[in-house]
Amino acid sequence: HRQHPAAQIARRWLREMPQHKFWRRVWETCLSFAPNDLTLIKIGRLWINQTPPTVEGWSFVWNRLWSLVQGNSELDQKARAWLRVAPPKHASWRHLWLPLWENSPGDSELESLALNWIQQASLARDSWSYVWERLWAFRPRPELVNEGKRWLGTTLPQNESWHRVWATLRASYPEDQELTDLAINWLQDPRSF
């Protein structure tokens, strides 16, 4: 079938302008009109392969591609390479790790990367608890207990995940005095409610 002239122009622009700061937005817009367009998927994969992961929008394009071709080994390897070198403070870390973990729960490399990340990432990040919870659900371990308590003691009391992390630890350690103290402190903090 014949393509709309605007679609032809957009595809040509995507091929010719991969360094443009709005490349991701143009690609996503095109994909929103043709979500199963194999040419656009191919253009996105080529862009991921040719673009350094530090470029703004790289993780968004990766996530969109992953949702379309989940389990693709090339995309898997690209994301793992990014996770190995990305600074823990990078906002996209969880957004690449989580889909990989959901596709390969218990993967030893992903587990190791996540353990390292939760020890180094800012405890103020909302994503911290999501990664911690996935690791705990897979395999509760002493370092997760310690990291969970550290997070409970330093995160803002109004964090919506606070009660989930505390309840998860409390279910496994009902007599733990430190968890009791953390809960008392949380209840006494006016910011908790």
Image (tube, grey):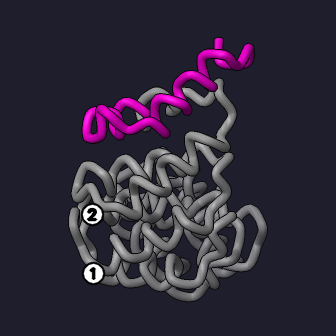
**Left or right: 126, with 109 as reference point:** right
Element carrying mark 2: loop
Q: Which SS does the magenta portion mostly show?
A: helix
From the viewer's side, name the closer residue of 91 and 130. 130
Which residue is denoted by mark 2 in the rendering? 70
User: In the image, is 122 to the left or to the right of 38?
Assistant: right
Q: Residue at x 35, y 40 (%)?
A: 169
Residue 106's tag is none
The local crowd at label 1, few if under 14, some if 14 to 19, many if 20 or more residues have their Cα within 10 Å, is: few
Q: Which one is nearer the viewer's eye here, 154 or 82? A: 154
- Residue sitting at 24 percent across and 69 percent down? 71
| In magenta stretch: residue 174 | yes
Residue 18 vertical placement versus 68 (above, below):
below
Q: Position of residue 45 (x, y in %)?
A: 44, 77
Start-end of magenta stretch: 166-193
Q: Secondary structure at mark 1?
A: helix
In the image as oriented, which residue stretches furthest toward the right? Answer: 21
